[in-house]
Amino acid sequence: KNQVEQSPQSLIILEGKNCTLQCNYTVSPFSNLRWYKQDTGRGPVSLTIMTFSENTKSNGRYTATLDADTKQSSLHITASQLSDSASYICVVSAQDSNYQLIWGAGTKLIIKP
Amino acid sequence: EAQVTQNPRYLITVTGKKLTVTCSQNMNHEYMSWYRQDPGLGLRQIYYSMNVEVTDKGDVPEGYKVSRKEKRNFPLILESPSPNQTSLYFCASRRNGPTGLREQYFGPGTRLTVT
């Protein structure tokens, strides 16, 4: 069964610190992996999209990595800011006819001043 | 401004009273989709539409209906809402594409409570 699991479920860090969020998936055949940021009560917004051949991708202070062999991805946030407080969701697309998305439950990140 | 809009944003209703949540996008996207989000769970797809007059069931279609008469609109219909449909609903749209890498844009969400 296609699944995406994220850890930790929640994380609290101090402003200015770095953190890394994890994503493991069992989606086959794999098409791509995305990281979304979702502010409370709002729709998800895309941070990165990576295909099989991409190992790392950055978007400002966000850096995503992908290991397609171990089916793991991570999202690293550098020098966190209060505005980074949100849920971060890992989403994997299967290479079926409609490229349906399999969503993780997300990691809730809280940045404290 | 390119966007996906949903209405209403908040809705409290009673069991069995039919309701419709509207979704509209101004980006000329072929693909539109409805999701529900519940605490501790990932987004689950309810229905999707690859183009006008083409709709398909997602992972949790029971108790919902959709229609796609126009490219820009994709309403979600609950014929007889029940308390287990209390949830946060998102509409999304994107272009169709051969690689599945098309960016998906989400609406602001509709928080539905069924008592």
Image (cartoon, coloured by chain):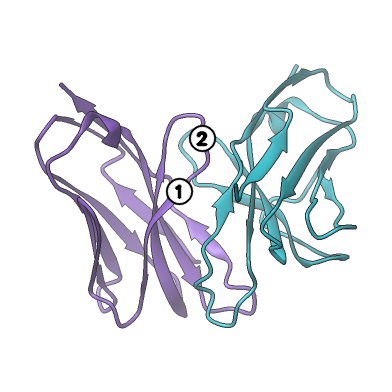
Chain colours: A purple, B cyan
Please tell me the numbered disc located at residue A42.
Answer: 2
> What amino acid is labelled 2 in the image?
Arg
Task: Give above or below for B1 relative to A26.
Answer: above
Q: Residues at badges 2 and 1 in contact (C-beta under 8 Å)?
A: yes
Q: CA distance from mark 2 to mark 1?
A: 9 Å
User: Residue at (84%, 65%) from the top-left corner?
Assistant: B52
Q: Position of residue B108 (x, y in %)?
A: 59, 37
Task: Give above or below for B31 relative to A104.
Answer: below
Residue that badge 1 annotates: A45
SS for dot 1: strand
User: Residue at (15%, 21%) from the top-left corner?
Assistant: A113
Q: Are marks 2 and 1 on the same chain?
A: yes
Q: Position of residue A102 (x, y in %)?
A: 51, 60
The answer to which image quadrant residue B69 occupies is bottom right
Q: Which of A42/A3 is in front? A: A42
Q: Position of residue A31 (x, y in %)?
A: 45, 77
Query: Crowding near pointer 2: few (<14 within 10 Å), some, many (20+)?
Result: some
SS for dot 2: loop
Task: Give above or below for A106 relative to B52.
Answer: above
- Taking the image as shown, residue A37 lies to the left or right of residue B1, namely left
* Residue at the left extreme, as displayed: A17
User: Residue at (44%, 77%) from the top-left corner?
Assistant: A30
> What amino acid is labelled 1 in the image?
Val
Q: Which of B1/B98 is in front? A: B1
Q: Which of B3/B61 is in front? A: B3
Chain at numbered mark 2: A
Query: Crowding near pointer 1: few (<14 within 10 Å), some, many (20+)?
Result: some
How many dots with numbers? Answer: 2
User: Residue at (81%, 45%) from the top-left corner?
Assistant: B75
Q: Position of residue B24 (x, y in %)?
A: 74, 47
Chain at numbered mark 1: A
